[in-house]
Image (tube, rainbow, N blue to C red):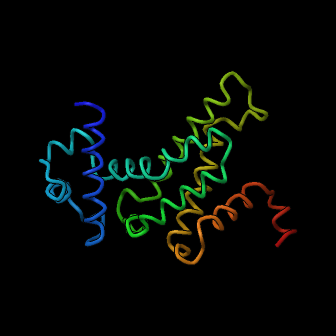
Amino acid sequence: MTQQGKNAIDMVLAESLIELSTKKPIEKITIKEITDKAGVIRPTFYNHFQDKYELIEWIINHELLEPIRPLIDAGMVFEAIVLMLTNVSANVTFYKKALRMEGPVTFNDIAMKAVYELFLGILNEKSSGKKPKYKWLTPEVVSTYYAQSLCFITEGWISQGVGEIEPREMAEAFMYLISRSMEDVLKEL
């Protein structure tokens, strides 16, 4: 199967899960329901994804992270965050449902993994051959820090602020927090 054909099936499966999530909790949606809605057979799903959690990770990567990668590479972090939050708001019903997932795998687990891998890839490319200023600040540690920060603020915005706070304002708040020390924030509040 060509990459284009694989991507088309991935998209159909993603759209199926997103639509089904409007009717019932994601953790209660079965692979059979996803494939029936998508008009494919169950083995097709397993040729693309291990489980629905991997499909959710694909949705996060495809809708939120892949579009922002070129902006981050170009040093346009603020614009990348605005775009990511704008894309979240375009599909906010799904992300609100995903945030409510219960069970052994949570939305935070999936999102953290995806964001961590994005940041780690970028940091490994940028820091290739360089020694860190502090031994402890490895690309893995830095990626974890920024993934946790971005997921925290995005999940808080999804659960409380979408519709009340525009993506640009939320991105400004995020940039404010990550660009200042705690000492600076305490002085400025």
In which quadrant of the rendered image does the N terminus lie? top left
List x then y, in percent, for residue 176.
Answer: 74, 61
Q: Who is closer to the viewer here, 123 or 139?
A: 123
Residue in view at x 24 percent, y 44 percent: 9
Q: Position of residue 152 (x, y in %)?
A: 58, 61
Residue at 37%, 47% in the rendered image: 58
Closer to us: 158 or 107: 158
Q: Residue furthest bottom?
A: 164
**Residue found 32% across the figure and 50% down from its top:** 55
Image: 4 above or below 178: above
Q: Is residue 94 left or right of residue 17?
A: right
- 137 shown above or below 19: above
Residue 66 vertical position relative to residue 34 in the rendered view, above or below: above
Is residue 70 found left or right of 96 in the rendered image?
A: right
Task: Point out residue 73 in the picture as x, y percentages from the top left corner.
Answer: 62, 38
The quarter of the rendered structure image containing the C terminus is bottom right
State the residue lying farthest toward the right: 187
Query: Residue 100's x, y, as percent?
Result: 40, 69
Report the residue at 30% width, 71% height from top: 22
Number of dots carrying numbers: 0
Name the image quarter holding residue 31.
bottom left
